[in-house]
Image (tube, rainbow, N blue to C red):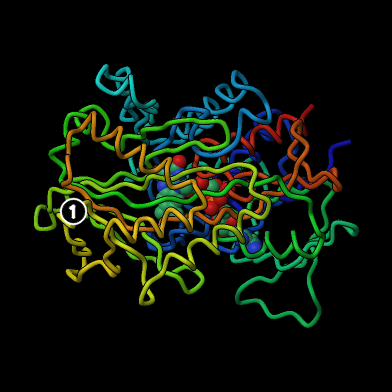
Amino acid sequence: MQKKIVIVGAGVAGINAATKLVDNGYDGSLITIIDKGNDPHNRLPEEVMTGMLGAGGWSDGKLTYHTAIGGQLAKYCGEDKAMELMDQVISNFRRFHPKPEEIFCSDPVAEPDFIKPYFGLRLFPVWHIGSNYLHEIAKAWYQYLVDKGVKFMWKTTAHNISFKEQSINISTRGIRTFAPVFEKYDELIFAVGKSGIDFAQQLSDDYKLPTEPKSVQIGVRFEAPQKYFQKLIDISYDFKLYQKYENVSLRSFCTNNNAAYVAVEETYGDVTYNGHAKKGEQFRNDMTNFGILMEIKGIEDPFKWSRDVVNKLQINKTGLYYSPGLTREPGLTSEGTIVSSSKISWMGLTYVEEIFQGYFTYIKDFIDQMNKVFEFGDDWGMYIPEVKYLSPEPLVNYTNLTLTEYPNVHFVGDALSARGITVSGAHGIYVAEYLLA
Ligand SMILES: Cc1cc2nc3c(=O)[nH]c(=O)nc-3n(C[C@H](O)[C@H](O)[C@H](O)COP(=O)(O)OP(=O)(O)OC[C@H]3O[C@@H](n4cnc5c(N)ncnc54)[C@H](O)[C@@H]3O)c2cc1C
């Protein structure tokens, strides 16, 4: 007998799961999808995070096609299966696309010889769906699922879940009720994405869900004139250099060119750095910036460790800026103000090394080796620190992405630490295949 499946989140993961199910004969009337956002006819373009097709499926639509990017997938199902699942996601976008012939794949060439002795260069194919078609895709896809009998509950927020009672406490915007409303399930697919991160955290705390061990992700934001990196940018605009050691791996992260600005972020009261690029000739500054992030494994409480390091790297209530021989000054933000930072000399850098407890050597080596390839000499600067605080990832059974203690609750997509459309959709399909089997 088929079971009642409730999917919380009509994002990329949830929608791909439902599609796989009904494509394979699952009775659509046994599937309910709850989403706090709007259906594709009423969803406004500026509602970026919530509603039919979720976040990037509504506003961007670049489908990365490699298992090393976008979050964990091959870990659960192996490389070959992961690629096959990603193919299915891409084919779903193609299927509901009004002009599928306009989808194209950018597939950069092999790693150039000038990089090889020093770095790995991550080059991966990306399918470009075309952001101007996403809303039409969402409408066609929605109609298909409705025609198959799938029930959608829009503007409906899940507030709590009783795993024991197998019921979800929900409320619908604009509808007043005098008693709490519950939706029961036999199988639950939890696909709330980034906009549901607090909800996921609340469940994790309430149920004391075991989590995967996490690594520290910390480093600096590097900045230099673009001319030094042009030969690489010509091959790969958003290049990703990487190096791997035993417990530490380093990668360049989120590269910005042409009109590239360093951004100041405030996290837990401390200043950290990031970067973004602006569009339009009026913003051009011919700079390049990117994060150099270390992933450090084996630190006992990575969150506490990172926060402590970040906190100690503040002087005068802001982060630090270092340029060798003080050759460069902190740049301007896209708003035209100087990037908030306290300038330090090489002596200050000794202090930074101390705070990083030996790990800073990896970053210095990374920069030294970049200098051999790109020959920027002293014409560069770095903003310290850049950090990614990873949210805890619930521990799941790898065969069906269920919580280890609740075998009918499947976590998928960004709720399971995915970071992209293709991987999130693939999670959904992977779970659907399990339910079909
Ligand atoms: C602006 C932007 C652009 C992006 N561009 C790209 C890109 O080009 N390529 C790429 O690979 N990745 C991109 N991403 C990342 C990508 O969008 C996500 O990795 C992916 O959407 C995650 O899929 P998901 O289904 O897990 O979550 P989402 O797609 O975020 O969907 C989650 C859904 O859950 C609903 N929800 C949340 N909480 C609740 C609740 N309590 N009750 C009911 N419903 C709830 C939300 O309304 C939402 O519709 C982008 C992200 C953003 C924000």
The answer to whether one can see residue 430 in this image is yes
User: Within 10 angstroms of label 1, few (less than 14), some, or many (20 or more) residues?
Assistant: few
Q: Is residue 261 left or right of residue 18?
A: left
Q: Residue at x 13, y 57 (%)?
A: 283
Q: Please tell me in which quadrant of the rendered image residue 12 appears.
A: top right
The residue most toward the bottom is 178
Q: Amino acid at mark 1?
A: Gly
The answer to whether one can see residue 146 in this image is no
Quadrant of the snapshot with the N terminus:
top right
Q: Is residue 260 left or right of residue 263?
A: left
Q: Which residue is mark 1?
A: 325
Q: Is mark 1 within 8 Å of ligand 1?
A: no
Q: Is residue 224 above or below residue 401?
A: below
Q: Position of residue 18 (x, y in %)?
A: 65, 40
Q: Residue at x 22, y 33 (%)?
A: 233
Q: Position of residue 261 (x, y in %)?
A: 24, 57
Q: Position of residue 315 (x, y in %)?
A: 37, 72
Q: Is residue 289 above or below residue 432?
A: below
Observer-nearest of 207 and 154? 207
Q: Is residue 405 above or below residue 232?
A: below
Quadrant of the snapshot with the C terminus:
top right
Q: How many marks?
A: 1
SS category of the residue bearing label 1: helix
Q: Please tell me in which quadrant of the rendered image residue 28 appears.
A: top right
Q: Position of residue 405 (x, y in %)?
A: 86, 47
Q: Is residue 109 left or right of residue 20?
A: left
Q: Residue at x 65, y 30 (%)?
A: 75
